[in-house]
Image (cartoon, rainbow, N blue to C red):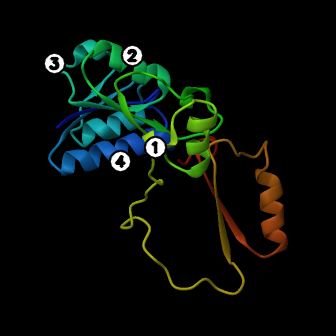
């Protein structure tokens, strides 16, 4: 099956970018033909290409129409649905606040997917989408990257903060000081820390 995955960006290693990457690679592994579309490309697009998933910045680059559009973000999904006038779509909502996650109405959107209960509520309350058209598919993770561990100790020894916006000029110093007071080693990961 030819699957066109849309996203507003495939640049930074963040939320929906990594979701698209992981889904596209899994679709490829299962014998499908995914193509990722975004007008803003970067490291995630390079990771997709390295995994042999085609990445396009312009919809006219796609030689054959998709069998289905796996749509993230309303502008990008709408662009794909307009360009490919018979392709059906499934529209995903990954957030309550971001403007690009606003619910999209289009006759060829067959199903809506919310990744949590709050996103489901956004589709219903702000988008007027009927509850019976929405599937709840919780975010996933790769168990081979995050294996089960032994039970946690009575008192934590290490802490991890993962945020693409925390840095030494925001809340990170407060977290660092609190951890130091408790004898907890703090690790910070994210774009602002330069180690995403």
Q: Position of residue 149 (x, y in %)?
A: 49, 80
Q: Position of residue 143 (x, y in %)?
A: 39, 67
Determine the secondary structure under disc 3: loop
Cα–Cα span, label 4 and label 1 = 27 Å
Q: Tell me: residue 93, above or below residue 158.
A: above
Q: Is residue 21 left or right of residue 100?
A: left
Which image quarter is the N terminus in? top left
Q: Tell me: residue 178, above or below residue 70.
A: below
Label 3, on which residue?
63
Specify the quadrant of the image occupied by residue 101.
top right
Q: Are marks 1 and 3 in contact (CB under 8 Å)?
A: no
Cα–Cα span, label 1 and label 2 = 26 Å
Residue that appears at 25% across and 43% down: 51
Q: Is residue 92 left or right of residue 63?
A: right
Label 4, on which residue?
22
Q: Are marks 4 and 3 in contact (CB under 8 Å)?
A: no
Residue sitting nearer the eye, 131 or 159: 131
Q: Tell me: residue 12, above or below residue 118.
A: above
Label 1, on which residue?
132
């Amino acid at each position: 099956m030819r699957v066109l995955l849309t996203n507003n960006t495939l640049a930074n290693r963040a939320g929906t970018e990594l979701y698209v990457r992981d889904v596209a690679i899994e679709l490829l592994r299962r014998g499908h033909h995914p193509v990722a579309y975004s007008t803003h490309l970067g490291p995630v697009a390079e990771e997709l290409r390295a995994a042999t998933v085609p990445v396009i910045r312009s919809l006219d680059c796609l030689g054959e129409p998709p069998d289905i559009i796996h749509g993230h973000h309303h502008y990008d999904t709408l662009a794909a649905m307009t360009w490919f006038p018979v392709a059906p779509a499934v529209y995903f909502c990954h957030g309550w606040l971001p403007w690009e996650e606003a619910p999209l109405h289009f006759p060829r959107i067959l199903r809506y997917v919310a990744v949590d209960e709050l996103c489901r509520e956004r589709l219903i309350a702000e988008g007027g989408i009927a509850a019976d058209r929405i599937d709840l598919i919780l975010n996933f993770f790769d168990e081979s990257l995050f294996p089960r561990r032994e039970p946690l100790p009575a008192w934590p020894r290490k802490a991890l903060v993962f945020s693409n916006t925390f840095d030494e000029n925001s809340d990170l110093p407060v977290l660092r000081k609190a951890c130091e007071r408790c004898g907890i080693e703090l690790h910070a990961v994210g774009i602002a820390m330069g180690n995403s």
